[in-house]
Image: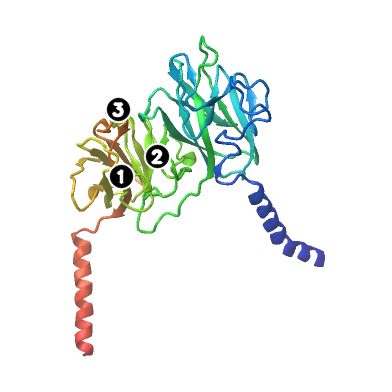
Amino acid sequence: MNSISAATKLFPLIWLLVSRFVAVYAADDGLLINGDFETAPSGGFADDGVGDSPNAVPSWKLNGTVELVTSGQKQGGMILIVPEGRHAVRLGNDAQISQDVKLEKGEIYSITFSASRTCAQLESLNVSVPPATQTIDLQTLYSVQGWDTYAWAFQADQEDAHVVFTNPGMEDDPTCGPIIDDIAIKKLFVPTKPKDNAVLNGDFEEGPWMFRNASLGVLLPTNLDEETSSLPGWIVESNRAVRYIDSYHFSVPGGKRALELLSGKEGIISQMVPTKPNKPYTMSFSLGHAGDMCKQPLAVMAFAGDQAENVHYTPDSNSTFQTANVNFTAKAERTRVAFYSVYYNTRSDDGSSLCGPVVDDIRVVVSRGIKDLGLSVCSLGFVVLGILFMV
């Protein structure tokens, strides 16, 4: 009995030590090892840039035609675009790069990376941490800089994992393919749902890794699985991305993060929130301008259950955002709330970079109707009478 008691007392200590061991060796939030590809190979950066061995790029395993490209490098009449710094990698036909990482099994992670197109007709990039995988379409260029930053989320199936980027394309020129750079990882935490708000992560403060010096925001491509979303609580329903933005480079209604809706009906975010049937609710949200030279008018279509309202942003010299409300009566125990941009907006300074209205601070609360107001007034009256009698 004493040995069992001692083992029982030791178990929490052992579990704590194991947890700390896993935490120490799990991947830290931020750039993967040589995730910016600025670490020179043992023989230095080659003139042709083509990796000729599986370990030609430090900390990465290569398979197929992988090229270390340099900012300003030319291919024919085309200048290759490196998203950040001096170097990046280009993946040729069916080529891939991978890196081993330590993760916490069962946790949700998001991978952030930058990508640009080169000479392929139909360009895409497959990112995976087996068995999880997703192919991201790179055909749409969202910014005039020639590259965009994306995020993709997954649930860790095991502690020893492999982050893999693959070019699934097959072109006549085997070197044609996407350029990738600045690969980072972040463990996501599902925020605690507020007692007075049915919406999870309605302020968008929890989301993918963002580089402090990156000014383009992070694109969130189509993701219909709310359990593995780079934006906890939310899914992206349509075939175009939405943009996750920060207060360091954009105007944000509240906190440090918000969401910019792009591409009209092709960029929809939604969430199923818990409700009580036949109860009246109010959905409120902040609507604004990101401060990114986006052409007006700006408007969103906001859905709450069977209600839909077209809300236009009306500029105010004292503020870059406004508050809007949508009233609805719940029909079920879960109600869908959703948003998309009414218009297809672009920036006025370049005429091609996609932009749109900003939404933030989304709340769904039970409406206080006339009956509730009457009860509140009666209660206040009784309190006042009580105080008078006491006096």
Specify whether residue 305 is in view.
no
Q: How crowded is mark 1: few (under 14 residues within 10 Å), some or many (20 or more)?
A: many
Query: Residue lying furthest top in this view?
Result: 172
Residue 157: percent from the left, percent from the top? Answer: 61, 38
Mark-to-mark CA distance, 1 and 2:
14 Å
Identify the residue shown where x is 27% and y is 33%: 347
Label number found at residue 47: none
Q: Name the residue under label 1.
A: 359
Where is mark 2, residue-wise?
A: 217
Q: Residues within 10 Å of mark 2 (few under 14, many from 20)?
A: many
- Location of the N terminus by quadrant is bottom right
Assign a secondary structure to mark 1.
Answer: strand
Q: How far apart are marks 3 and 2 (CA)?
A: 16 Å
Quadrant location, the C terminus: bottom left
Query: Which numbered circle lies on residue 352?
Result: 3
User: Considering the numbered disc 2 on the image, is that residue within a helix, a strand or a loop?
Assistant: loop
Q: Rounded to the nearest whole Å, what is the CA distance between mark 3 and mark 1? A: 22 Å
Q: Where is residue 311 in the image (x, y as percent from the top left)?
A: 21, 42
Q: Identity of the amino acid at label 3?
A: Ser
The amino acid sitting under disc 2 is: Gly
Instruction: Tell me which label, 3 or 2, sits earlier in the chain.
Output: 2
